[in-house]
Amino acid sequence: MTYQDLAAGEILFHQNDPATAIFAVESGRVSLIHYTEAGKTVNHYSVMTGEYFAEVALFNEIYVCTVIAEIPSRIVSFPKQVFLTALAQDPDLSTAFIEQLARRLHYTKLLLELRGIRSARERVLHYLRVMTPPNKKTVSLNRPLKQIAGDIGISPEVFSRTLTQLQNERLITRVRRRITLND
Amino acid sequence: MTYQDLAAGEILFHQNDPATAIFAVESGRVSLIHYTEAGKTVNHYSVMTGEYFAEVALFNEIYVCTVIAEIPSRIVSFPKQVFLTALAQDPDLSTAFIEQLARRLHYTKLLLELRGIRSARERVLHYLRVMTPPNKKTVSLNRPLKQIAGDIGISPEVFSRTLTQLQNERLITRVRRRITLND
DNA sequence: CGCATAGTTGACTACGCTCAACCCTGGTGG
DNA sequence: CCACCAGGGTTGAGCGTAGTCAACTATGCG
């Protein structure tokens, strides 16, 4: 397990490089980029602080994308074989890793579902309902609203507007980042 | 590990039921539905043949959604504790399960990425590039453009317009449903 | 007491949706 | 062989909503 500091624009690894490690962002933000035959970039998403990436590299011979730092970032890397044998030998670790993957998969699917909804109003309502813990009515959004807006797929401004609109309609009650649903 | 056959409309389990198992669809299709406090459904996506679902139930006390069969379906269920202890005791199984989760997470993220692209133009380009077989430049869309538009998440009209626009810009060449990329 | 960052609000723009008419192709029957 | 029809596909016009840019406020931190 080693640390690497990347400057903005610095490349961590290239698509088709042999896959040797799995990574996590300790601080900063990196972008995953996909190249086609023609050399055009077709796909990128950003990985934020605290997230793993290149998990799929554990099971592939080569990386399927190129990773570049968007802003100065500190990256933790775990050599692939070390990580795999650790997983095989330590049931607690592998269970914990499975749990992380399962939760992230679940969350990602929810986001995908969200993207099918056109209206910002409905999308935000849907998001709030989904994020509210079972049997509770209040959810506290403990991340910058910017980021949440990004997850939902709308601009921060519209997110802000929509929240105040919903509050005016008495559909939600809001105190800072604690939001209560009044169904 | 047991099998269950569901008729169309039959319910496998309800939201808030104690989580006792993890499932896979052997044949058919089931729908995952989310209920709010007020009883309104807020979320659903479909699980196709060959896919696991309720993985997150492994780590939760209760199910977070209700599962209903859309069409007659055969479901395989693995009791939660059995599956968890099997994972802990069998490194090969846990590694295989991790691999599945990692791949599905990756694929889901790709779909999410596509939906995240605002501009119809860029979204269509991205889609075409992703759909084009490796080492080829031509893709043939052998389904009604309507359906494809639905997959991409834009209206058929806009899809049509966008294709002709791209053709005018010489970015693509189009003969009926065969499309060639001119990067 | 500033400074940086997050969040809010306003004005304007632009893009995609909707509805509608039209075109084109393939199939069917007279 | 043509007339008709149905469906997918294309194009046009107008509208609405979310994005953008900008100014401003609030909050947290040194």
Image (cartoon, coloured by chain):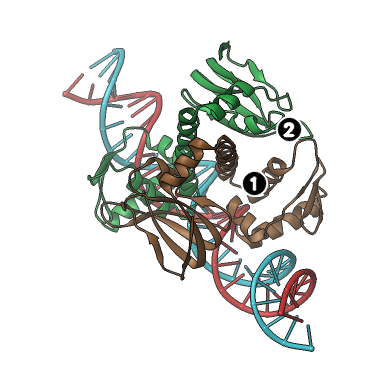
Chain colours: A brown, B green, C cyan, D red
Mark 2 burial class by Cα count in 10 Å: few <14, some 14-19, many 20+: few
The disc at residue B69 is: none
- Image quarter where the C terminus of chain A lies is top right
Q: Position of residue C21 (x, y in %)?
A: 44, 42
Relative to A163, is D27 above or below? below
For label 1, the SS is helix
Relative to A100, is A158 above or below? below
Q: Position of residue D4 (x, y in %)?
A: 34, 24
In the rendered image, which quarter is residue B61 located in?
Answer: top right
Residue A107 seen by the camera: yes
The disc at residue B40 is: 2
Query: Is residue A147 rendered to the left or right of residue A166?
Result: left
- Tell me the amino acid under the disc marked 2: Lys
Q: Outermost residue toward the front? A: A89
Pointer 1 and pointer 2: residues touching (CB < 8 Å)?
A: no
* Residue identified by numbered label 1: A123
Mark 1 burial class by Cα count in 10 Å: few <14, some 14-19, many 20+: many
